[in-house]
Image (cartoon, rainbow, N blue to C red):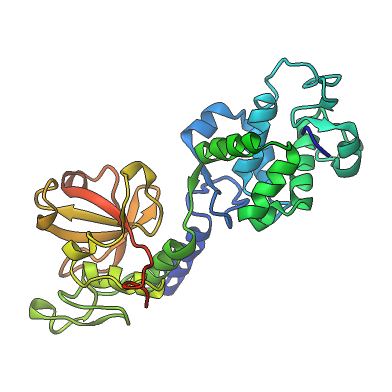
Protein backbone atom coordinates (compact mmCIF):
# COMPACT_ATOMS: atom_id res chain seq x y z
CA UNK A 1 0.00 0.00 0.00
CA UNK A 2 1.45 3.23 -1.07
CA UNK A 3 -1.20 5.38 0.65
CA UNK A 4 -2.91 5.58 4.17
CA UNK A 5 -33.32 -36.94 -0.75
CA UNK A 6 -36.51 -35.70 -2.40
CA UNK A 7 -36.90 -33.72 -5.59
CA UNK A 8 -37.44 -30.61 -3.50
CA UNK A 9 -34.33 -31.36 -1.52
CA UNK A 10 -32.36 -31.88 -4.70
CA UNK A 11 -33.58 -28.59 -6.08
CA UNK A 12 -32.67 -26.80 -2.86
CA UNK A 13 -29.19 -28.27 -3.00
CA UNK A 14 -28.75 -27.03 -6.56
CA UNK A 15 -29.98 -23.58 -5.63
CA UNK A 16 -27.49 -23.54 -2.77
CA UNK A 17 -24.82 -24.67 -5.18
CA UNK A 18 -25.59 -21.72 -7.42
CA UNK A 19 -24.66 -19.31 -4.67
CA UNK A 20 -21.16 -20.74 -4.58
CA UNK A 21 -21.09 -21.53 -8.26
CA UNK A 22 -17.70 -22.90 -9.20
CA UNK A 23 -16.33 -22.09 -5.75
CA UNK A 24 -15.71 -25.80 -5.26
CA UNK A 25 -13.97 -26.75 -2.03
CA UNK A 26 -12.69 -23.24 -1.47
CA UNK A 27 -14.33 -20.44 0.44
CA UNK A 28 -17.17 -18.63 -1.28
CA UNK A 29 -15.79 -15.31 -0.13
CA UNK A 30 -16.90 -12.41 -2.21
CA UNK A 31 -19.21 -14.37 -4.49
CA UNK A 32 -21.82 -11.65 -4.16
CA UNK A 33 -19.68 -9.47 -6.39
CA UNK A 34 -19.73 -9.50 -10.18
CA UNK A 35 -15.95 -9.96 -10.09
CA UNK A 36 -15.76 -12.93 -7.78
CA UNK A 37 -15.84 -16.63 -8.55
CA UNK A 38 -13.82 -19.79 -8.42
CA UNK A 39 -10.04 -19.65 -8.73
CA UNK A 40 -9.04 -20.16 -12.35
CA UNK A 41 -6.25 -22.44 -13.51
CA UNK A 42 -4.01 -19.36 -13.68
CA UNK A 43 -4.83 -18.45 -10.09
CA UNK A 44 -4.02 -21.94 -8.83
CA UNK A 45 -0.80 -21.96 -10.82
CA UNK A 46 0.36 -18.50 -9.84
CA UNK A 47 -0.80 -18.08 -6.24
CA UNK A 48 0.98 -20.15 -3.56
CA UNK A 49 -1.56 -22.43 -1.84
CA UNK A 50 -1.15 -20.75 1.55
CA UNK A 51 -1.65 -17.32 0.03
CA UNK A 52 -4.75 -18.49 -1.86
CA UNK A 53 -6.25 -19.73 1.39
CA UNK A 54 -5.42 -16.43 3.15
CA UNK A 55 -7.00 -14.39 0.33
CA UNK A 56 -10.17 -16.48 0.35
CA UNK A 57 -10.48 -16.39 4.14
CA UNK A 58 -9.65 -12.71 4.49
CA UNK A 59 -12.28 -11.71 1.92
CA UNK A 60 -14.92 -13.30 4.13
CA UNK A 61 -14.23 -10.68 6.80
CA UNK A 62 -15.59 -8.01 4.44
CA UNK A 63 -18.94 -9.03 2.91
CA UNK A 64 -18.93 -8.25 -0.80
CA UNK A 65 -15.16 -7.93 -1.15
CA UNK A 66 -14.04 -10.12 -4.07
CA UNK A 67 -11.23 -12.42 -2.95
CA UNK A 68 -9.59 -12.08 -6.37
CA UNK A 69 -9.25 -8.31 -6.00
CA UNK A 70 -7.39 -8.91 -2.74
CA UNK A 71 -5.23 -11.49 -4.51
CA UNK A 72 -4.59 -9.13 -7.43
CA UNK A 73 -3.33 -6.48 -5.02
CA UNK A 74 -1.01 -9.07 -3.50
CA UNK A 75 0.24 -9.92 -6.97
CA UNK A 76 0.88 -6.31 -7.96
CA UNK A 77 2.47 -5.35 -4.65
CA UNK A 78 4.85 -8.26 -4.08
CA UNK A 79 4.09 -11.17 -6.44
CA UNK A 80 2.47 -12.91 -3.45
CA UNK A 81 5.52 -12.40 -1.29
CA UNK A 82 8.00 -13.70 -3.86
CA UNK A 83 9.46 -10.31 -4.75
CA UNK A 84 12.99 -9.58 -3.54
CA UNK A 85 12.46 -5.81 -3.74
CA UNK A 86 13.35 -3.69 -0.69
CA UNK A 87 10.66 -3.64 1.98
CA UNK A 88 8.88 -6.87 1.08
CA UNK A 89 10.55 -9.12 3.66
CA UNK A 90 12.16 -6.51 5.89
CA UNK A 91 12.73 -2.79 6.08
CA UNK A 92 10.82 -0.41 3.83
CA UNK A 93 10.89 0.71 0.24
CA UNK A 94 11.55 4.29 -0.83
CA UNK A 95 7.92 5.22 -0.09
CA UNK A 96 8.09 3.75 3.41
CA UNK A 97 5.96 0.69 2.66
CA UNK A 98 6.73 -2.78 4.00
CA UNK A 99 5.50 -6.37 3.85
CA UNK A 100 3.86 -8.48 1.12
CA UNK A 101 0.84 -6.14 0.98
CA UNK A 102 3.07 -3.02 1.21
CA UNK A 103 1.67 -1.14 4.20
CA UNK A 104 2.92 2.19 5.42
CA UNK A 105 3.68 2.01 9.14
CA UNK A 106 0.95 4.53 10.01
CA UNK A 107 -1.68 2.72 7.94
CA UNK A 108 -0.67 -0.60 9.47
CA UNK A 109 -1.00 0.87 12.94
CA UNK A 110 -4.60 1.80 12.10
CA UNK A 111 -5.66 -1.30 10.16
CA UNK A 112 -3.23 -4.09 11.09
CA UNK A 113 -4.70 -7.49 12.01
CA UNK A 114 -3.37 -10.40 14.05
CA UNK A 115 -4.54 -12.89 11.46
CA UNK A 116 -2.74 -15.94 12.83
CA UNK A 117 -3.61 -15.12 16.46
CA UNK A 118 -0.02 -15.27 17.69
CA UNK A 119 -0.39 -12.08 19.70
CA UNK A 120 1.43 -9.88 17.16
CA UNK A 121 0.32 -7.71 14.24
CA UNK A 122 3.17 -8.10 11.80
CA UNK A 123 2.95 -6.41 8.41
CA UNK A 124 5.70 -8.70 7.11
CA UNK A 125 3.66 -11.81 7.98
CA UNK A 126 1.23 -12.58 5.12
CA UNK A 127 -1.17 -14.26 7.57
CA UNK A 128 -1.54 -10.81 9.18
CA UNK A 129 -0.95 -8.54 6.19
CA UNK A 130 -3.62 -10.06 3.93
CA UNK A 131 -6.51 -9.72 6.41
CA UNK A 132 -5.12 -6.28 7.22
CA UNK A 133 -5.46 -5.33 3.56
CA UNK A 134 -9.02 -6.68 3.55
CA UNK A 135 -9.79 -4.53 6.60
CA UNK A 136 -8.37 -1.43 4.94
CA UNK A 137 -10.26 -2.04 1.70
CA UNK A 138 -13.45 -2.65 3.64
CA UNK A 139 -13.02 0.60 5.55
CA UNK A 140 -13.00 2.29 2.15
CA UNK A 141 -16.27 0.53 1.18
CA UNK A 142 -14.81 -2.06 -1.21
CA UNK A 143 -17.58 -4.49 -0.23
CA UNK A 144 -20.15 -2.25 -1.92
CA UNK A 145 -18.71 -3.08 -5.34
CA UNK A 146 -18.83 -0.99 -8.49
CA UNK A 147 -17.54 2.55 -8.15
CA UNK A 148 -16.94 2.07 -4.43
CA UNK A 149 -14.68 -0.90 -5.10
CA UNK A 150 -12.67 1.10 -7.63
CA UNK A 151 -12.33 3.96 -5.17
CA UNK A 152 -11.15 1.58 -2.46
CA UNK A 153 -8.46 0.20 -4.77
CA UNK A 154 -7.47 3.77 -5.65
CA UNK A 155 -7.10 4.55 -1.94
CA UNK A 156 -4.71 1.60 -1.70
CA UNK A 157 -2.44 3.31 -4.23
CA UNK A 158 -3.49 6.71 -5.53
CA UNK A 159 -3.17 6.02 -9.25
CA UNK A 160 -5.71 5.20 -11.96
CA UNK A 161 -3.24 2.89 -13.69
CA UNK A 162 -3.01 0.91 -10.47
CA UNK A 163 -6.78 0.43 -10.33
CA UNK A 164 -6.81 -0.79 -13.93
CA UNK A 165 -3.91 -3.15 -13.33
CA UNK A 166 -5.50 -4.67 -10.23
CA UNK A 167 -8.88 -5.20 -11.89
CA UNK A 168 -7.26 -6.72 -14.98
CA UNK A 169 -5.31 -9.15 -12.81
CA UNK A 170 -8.40 -9.92 -10.72
CA UNK A 171 -10.29 -10.93 -13.85
CA UNK A 172 -7.57 -13.48 -14.63
CA UNK A 173 -7.83 -15.03 -11.19
CA UNK A 174 -11.53 -15.84 -10.99
CA UNK A 175 -14.18 -17.46 -13.16
CA UNK A 176 -17.35 -15.35 -13.10
CA UNK A 177 -20.38 -16.38 -11.11
CA UNK A 178 -23.97 -15.75 -11.98
CA UNK A 179 -24.92 -12.17 -11.35
CA UNK A 180 -27.60 -9.69 -12.32
CA UNK A 181 -30.12 -10.82 -14.94
CA UNK A 182 -28.14 -13.99 -15.69
CA UNK A 183 -28.44 -15.10 -12.07
CA UNK A 184 -32.19 -14.47 -12.11
CA UNK A 185 -32.58 -16.52 -15.29
CA UNK A 186 -30.56 -19.42 -13.91
CA UNK A 187 -32.48 -19.49 -10.63
CA UNK A 188 -35.78 -19.33 -12.51
CA UNK A 189 -34.82 -22.34 -14.64
CA UNK A 190 -33.62 -24.30 -11.62
CA UNK A 191 -37.06 -23.97 -10.08
CA UNK A 192 -38.45 -26.30 -12.75
CA UNK A 193 -35.88 -29.11 -12.62
CA UNK A 194 -37.70 -32.40 -13.16
CA UNK A 195 -40.54 -30.82 -15.16
CA UNK A 196 -41.50 -32.94 -18.19
CA UNK A 197 -40.41 -31.99 -21.66
CA UNK A 198 -43.38 -30.93 -23.75
CA UNK A 199 -43.07 -30.13 -27.45
CA UNK A 200 -44.31 -26.56 -27.88
CA UNK A 201 -44.83 -26.25 -24.13
CA UNK A 202 -43.95 -23.41 -21.82
CA UNK A 203 -43.63 -19.67 -22.13
CA UNK A 204 -43.04 -16.48 -20.16
CA UNK A 205 -45.51 -17.45 -17.41
CA UNK A 206 -44.33 -21.03 -16.86
CA UNK A 207 -45.07 -24.57 -18.07
CA UNK A 208 -48.03 -25.15 -20.39
CA UNK A 209 -49.51 -27.98 -22.44
CA UNK A 210 -47.69 -28.27 -25.72
CA UNK A 211 -48.70 -29.13 -29.26
CA UNK A 212 -48.46 -32.25 -31.45
CA UNK A 213 -46.66 -34.91 -29.38
CA UNK A 214 -46.63 -32.47 -26.46
CA UNK A 215 -50.38 -31.86 -26.45
CA UNK A 216 -51.00 -34.14 -23.46
CA UNK A 217 -48.01 -33.01 -21.40
CA UNK A 218 -47.67 -29.89 -19.31
CA UNK A 219 -44.08 -28.70 -19.28
CA UNK A 220 -41.42 -26.97 -21.33
CA UNK A 221 -39.60 -27.50 -24.55
CA UNK A 222 -36.10 -26.06 -24.87
CA UNK A 223 -37.03 -22.58 -26.06
CA UNK A 224 -40.08 -22.42 -23.80
CA UNK A 225 -37.77 -22.88 -20.81
CA UNK A 226 -35.33 -20.21 -21.92
CA UNK A 227 -38.17 -17.82 -22.74
CA UNK A 228 -39.60 -18.35 -19.24
CA UNK A 229 -36.25 -18.00 -17.45
CA UNK A 230 -35.32 -14.75 -19.12
CA UNK A 231 -38.84 -13.33 -18.74
CA UNK A 232 -38.26 -13.56 -14.97
CA UNK A 233 -35.16 -11.43 -15.55
CA UNK A 234 -37.26 -8.82 -17.35
CA UNK A 235 -36.36 -9.70 -20.93
CA UNK A 236 -38.81 -10.98 -23.54
CA UNK A 237 -37.37 -13.52 -25.97
CA UNK A 238 -38.86 -14.85 -29.22
CA UNK A 239 -40.50 -18.26 -28.88
CA UNK A 240 -38.34 -20.27 -31.30
CA UNK A 241 -34.70 -21.19 -30.60
CA UNK A 242 -33.41 -20.01 -33.99
CA UNK A 243 -35.04 -16.61 -33.41
CA UNK A 244 -33.62 -16.39 -29.88
CA UNK A 245 -30.16 -16.74 -31.42
CA UNK A 246 -30.68 -13.38 -33.10
CA UNK A 247 -31.58 -11.65 -29.83
CA UNK A 248 -28.86 -10.28 -27.58
CA UNK A 249 -25.08 -10.06 -27.77
CA UNK A 250 -23.12 -12.96 -29.26
CA UNK A 251 -20.58 -14.18 -26.71
CA UNK A 252 -17.27 -15.97 -27.39
CA UNK A 253 -17.15 -19.34 -25.69
CA UNK A 254 -14.23 -18.30 -23.49
CA UNK A 255 -16.37 -15.51 -22.03
CA UNK A 256 -19.49 -17.53 -21.17
CA UNK A 257 -21.29 -16.56 -17.97
CA UNK A 258 -24.14 -18.32 -16.19
CA UNK A 259 -27.43 -17.38 -17.80
CA UNK A 260 -26.04 -17.09 -21.33
CA UNK A 261 -27.94 -19.04 -23.98
CA UNK A 262 -26.18 -21.91 -25.77
CA UNK A 263 -27.34 -22.89 -29.26
CA UNK A 264 -26.98 -26.18 -31.14
CA UNK A 265 -27.53 -26.75 -34.86
CA UNK A 266 -27.60 -29.59 -37.35
CA UNK A 267 -25.01 -27.60 -39.27
CA UNK A 268 -23.05 -25.49 -36.75
CA UNK A 269 -21.96 -23.10 -39.50
CA UNK A 270 -25.57 -22.33 -40.43
CA UNK A 271 -27.68 -20.69 -37.67
CA UNK A 272 -30.80 -21.43 -39.73
CA UNK A 273 -30.43 -25.09 -38.69
CA UNK A 274 -30.51 -24.37 -34.93
CA UNK A 275 -32.73 -26.92 -33.22
CA UNK A 276 -31.87 -26.64 -29.51
CA UNK A 277 -31.14 -23.99 -26.90
CA UNK A 278 -29.93 -24.30 -23.31
CA UNK A 279 -28.98 -22.03 -20.41
CA UNK A 280 -25.34 -22.00 -19.38
CA UNK A 281 -25.04 -22.98 -15.70
CA UNK A 282 -21.29 -22.71 -15.23
CA UNK A 283 -18.37 -25.12 -14.97
CA UNK A 284 -19.14 -26.53 -18.42
CA UNK A 285 -22.74 -27.44 -17.58
CA UNK A 286 -26.12 -26.31 -18.85
CA UNK A 287 -29.78 -26.34 -17.82
CA UNK A 288 -32.13 -27.48 -20.57
CA UNK A 289 -35.26 -29.34 -21.61
CA UNK A 290 -33.71 -32.07 -23.79
CA UNK A 291 -36.42 -33.96 -25.69
CA UNK A 292 -39.74 -35.81 -25.45
CA UNK A 293 -39.64 -38.37 -22.65
CA UNK A 294 -37.05 -36.45 -20.67
CA UNK A 295 -37.28 -33.68 -18.07
CA UNK A 296 -35.69 -30.30 -17.39
CA UNK A 297 -32.24 -31.14 -16.11
CA UNK A 298 -28.65 -30.02 -15.63
CA UNK A 299 -26.34 -31.72 -18.12
CA UNK A 300 -22.73 -31.58 -19.16
CA UNK A 301 -21.99 -29.34 -22.11
CA UNK A 302 -18.20 -29.14 -22.24
CA UNK A 303 -16.72 -32.44 -23.37
CA UNK A 304 -20.05 -33.96 -24.45
CA UNK A 305 -19.26 -35.15 -28.00
CA UNK A 306 -22.83 -34.79 -29.27
CA UNK A 307 -23.24 -31.26 -27.93
CA UNK A 308 -19.73 -30.21 -28.93
CA UNK A 309 -20.32 -31.27 -32.55
CA UNK A 310 -23.53 -29.25 -32.79
CA UNK A 311 -22.56 -26.17 -30.78
CA UNK A 312 -23.00 -23.08 -32.94
CA UNK A 313 -22.63 -20.20 -30.50
CA UNK A 314 -23.99 -18.32 -27.51
CA UNK A 315 -25.82 -15.10 -26.77
CA UNK A 316 -26.39 -12.95 -23.71
CA UNK A 317 -29.91 -11.47 -23.76
CA UNK A 318 -29.88 -7.75 -23.15
CA UNK A 319 -32.54 -5.29 -22.12
CA UNK A 320 -33.93 -2.88 -24.68
CA UNK A 321 -37.23 -1.16 -25.25
CA UNK A 322 -38.34 -4.05 -27.42
CA UNK A 323 -37.28 -6.84 -25.08
CA UNK A 324 -38.10 -5.56 -21.59
CA UNK A 325 -41.19 -7.02 -19.95
Name the one closer to the observer, 148 or 207. Answer: 148
> In the rendered image, which quarter is residue 156 located in?
top right
Q: Quarter of the image for the C terminus: give it.
A: bottom left
- Which residue is painted at 74% across and 45% down in the image? 134
> In the rendered image, which quarter is residue 318 located in?
bottom left
> In the rendered image, which quarter is residue 187 located in?
bottom left
**In this rendering, position of residue 317 left or right of residue 108:** left
Where 171 sits versus 46, above or below? below
Q: Is residue 58 visible?
A: no
Q: Position of residue 12 (x, y in %)?
A: 47, 69
Q: Position of residue 44 (x, y in %)?
A: 53, 32
- Which residue is painted at 58% across and 40% down in the image? 167
Q: Position of residue 71 (x, y in %)?
A: 64, 37
Where 174 sits versus 45, above or below? below
Q: Quarter of the image for the N terminus: give it.
A: top right
**In this rendering, position of residue 163 left or right of residue 202:** right
Q: Position of residue 13 (x, y in %)?
A: 48, 64
Amino acid sequence: MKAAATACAATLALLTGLLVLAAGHDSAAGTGSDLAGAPTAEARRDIPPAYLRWYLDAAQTCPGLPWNVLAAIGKVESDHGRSTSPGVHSGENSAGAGGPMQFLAATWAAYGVDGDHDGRKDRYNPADAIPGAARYLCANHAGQGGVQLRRAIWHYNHADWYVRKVLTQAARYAAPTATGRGAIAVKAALRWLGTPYSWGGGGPTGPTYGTAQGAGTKGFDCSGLTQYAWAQAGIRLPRVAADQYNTGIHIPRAQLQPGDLLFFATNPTNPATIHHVAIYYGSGRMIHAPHTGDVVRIAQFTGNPYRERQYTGATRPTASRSTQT
